Every structure is written in C-alpha cells, then in structure tokens.
Image (cartoon, rainbow, N blue to C red):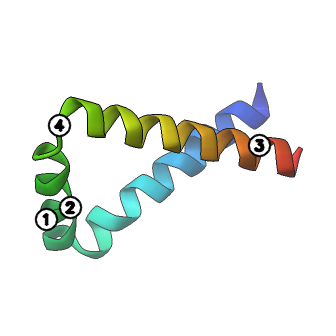
Amino acid sequence: MTVFVMAIGLMLVLEGALPFISPAGWRRVFAQVLALSDGQLRFFGLSSMIAGLVIVFISG
C-alpha cells in the first residue's frame, strides 16, 4: 500500500509541474486536448495506459 500511495504522490507532482512552470503553455495544451474527438481521446488514454503498464513491468 505504501508503494501505491507513493506512486499517486509522484503522479500528482508530475502532473502539477507543467501548470506551475508554464501556466500559459498548459492552457494551450489543455485547449488542444478539448478539441480532440472522443476516439482520439480514447486512443490517447489507451496508449497512456499501455505505456504505464510497460514501465511498471520493466521496472518491477
């Protein structure tokens, strides 16, 4: 459980870095994401999950 909590904490740190470092850039990226279709968002989400699983399996 400790590893899970640490992973969530690290995820929050990494996701908060871009809006902290470059708020204007983050807004541009977010606006582009909002313009994507549902299929494109699903593909991006699936790709992200697969990449995360690969990283977990390689590091584990």
Q: Secondary structure at mark 2?
A: helix
Structural distance between the alpha carbons of marks 1 and 4:
17 Å
- As measured in the structure, the alpha-carbon distance from the residue carrying label 4 to the one carrying label 2 is 15 Å
The kind of residue tagged 1 is: Arg
Q: Quadrant of the C terminus?
A: top right
Q: Nearer the viewer, residue 26 or 3?
A: 26
* Residue 41 locus on image (x, y percent): 29, 37
Q: Which residue is mark 3?
A: 56
Residue on which disc 1 sits: 28
What is the distance, in whole Å, between disc 2 and disc 1 at their CAs? 4 Å
Look at 21% across and 64% down and name the residue there: 26
- How many numbered marks, from 0 up? 4
The tag on residue 43 is none
Which residue is depicted at the point 10% across and 47% down? 35
Please identify the residue farthest to the right as the structure is shown. 60
Is the Cβ of the residue at disc 1 closer than 8 Å to that at disc 4? no
Disc 4 to disc 3, C-alpha distance: 29 Å
